[in-house]
Image: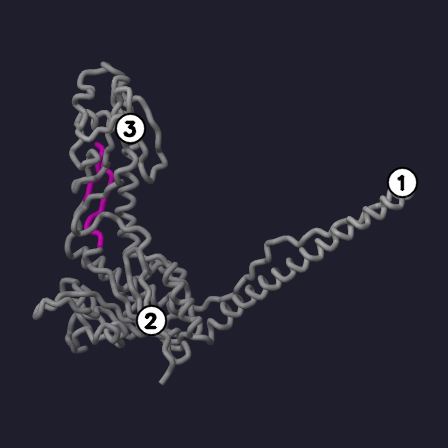
Amino acid sequence: MSLRFRRTLRLAPGVRLNFGLRGMSVSAGPRGLSLTAGRGGVFGNLGLPGTGVSFREKLVPPGARAGTPTLSSLPAGASALGDGVYRVSLNLDLDEHGRLVFKDAAGLSLDPRLERIVKRDHTGELEEFLACRCDEINAGGAEIVGIHTNVPPPDQAHHYQPRPYGKPAPERPSPPKPGFLDRLFPWLRHDKEQEFGHEMDHFRKLESEWKQEKELHDAEQERLRKRYEQDRLTDPAVMSDFLEESFAIAGWPRETRVDFDLEDGGARLTLDVDLPEVEDMPVASAERAARGLKLNIKKLSEGSIRGTYSVHVHGVVFRCLGLAFATLPSVQTVTCAAYTQRADPATGRVRDIYLLSVVASRSEWRAISFANLQALDVIEALERFDLRLAMSADGALEPILPHARLHGEQQNGVEAPARPEDAGAERRP
């Protein structure tokens, strides 16, 4: 029986957008925007997250125009700052139609007059805020469908560049030069020579400590070099460490969990991937409105969301295969099975359902042009390998029987239901 090295890691996303299936509001949070009003007038304290803009400015002097808010009309919850001045904190949000929404700290609608002041005097900053939110919404979708585009090629040179020891060597003291008085008074020369002897003793001590520290540093760098260039090829435990690090630093747009199992001395790798849910996919796209402080938000169809999910699922598997081959030169075959959680219609219990399973060899993987991944159709790319996939006519991914199950073995035998391989389901919509 071959020795196995099994490990589980959870890959957290870099940024989660507050823009999902259950709601389309995007919030900047309670910080960043406040107003101060009092006898001296109305002041704006504006700092929009993501824009770098932050300043305080007098908006309206007392009695400057009709309709200017007075202390008696300030929203409830205003805090007194002294000298008749009050501060009101605001939350800046977007509603489901892409319009700016101003609320106080308690979540209540802001006094319309204060809202008009902010819109009138800080239009540029608010437009920049909208532009940032528009980019975030659309970039999230692009990252999800383009997760495969930065996969490294499989055959890379793994060389470790040792770090030089940064601490400089101690400076040797210079011997004293005898002067005129030293020749006249020998004891002066003796005192200088004795002081120089003490300096040399101190120097030798520092030099010995420095050499010992440098030797330890160089030995550690050599250990790291050997681990990076040699042990990575022969030691499955070290291979597991490198693979875990490679997956963790890759960056994932949605939370993804991976179990992996190395066998045959690191020649064979099995991956079990817990996929994001279809509910985590973007449900809308956004663009700046031609007029007004708002975004035009277009709700995506269910078919479009399913298509995005299918591309993302294939992209996640493609990236897992690519990272494995690029990180571990000894791996010759990778089996990757991807699953999600669904309720069993017969029992109502939530079970792990496998949606995709593929086996790829290093020689087959080399045929992909990694310099042109932008032009690659990730679904067609995986179809070149030993792929198990079932897709209904409306584009929904259906359960399949995977090549291997790591996760099912660990979770009290919960496995995907068997699906006949000749079920006749279509590969793509």
Q: Residue at x 78, y 50 (%)?
A: 196
Instruction: Indicate how the structure is coloured in the image.
Output: one colour
Indicate which label's residue lies in the foreground, 1 or 3.
Answer: 1
Q: Residues within 10 Å of mark 2 (few under 14, many from 20)?
A: many
In-image side of 263 versus 108 (left or right): right
- In the picture, the disc for residue 260 is 2
Name the quarter where the C terminus is drawn: bottom left
Q: CA distance from mark 2 to mark 3?
A: 53 Å
Amino acid carrying mark 2 in the image: Phe
In-image side of 394 versus 12 (left or right): left
In-image side of 219 versus 152 (left or right): right
Q: Which residue is mark 3?
A: 122
Q: Nearer the viewer, residue 274 or 387?
A: 274
Q: Position of residue 259 (x, y in %)?
A: 31, 69
Q: Residues within 10 Å of mark 1 (few under 14, many from 20)?
A: few
Task: Based on the picture, tell me whether residue 282 belongs to the magenta stretch.
Answer: yes
Q: Which residue is mark 1?
A: 180
Q: Residue at x 63, y 62 (%)?
A: 212
Q: Residue at x 28, y 61 (%)?
A: 256
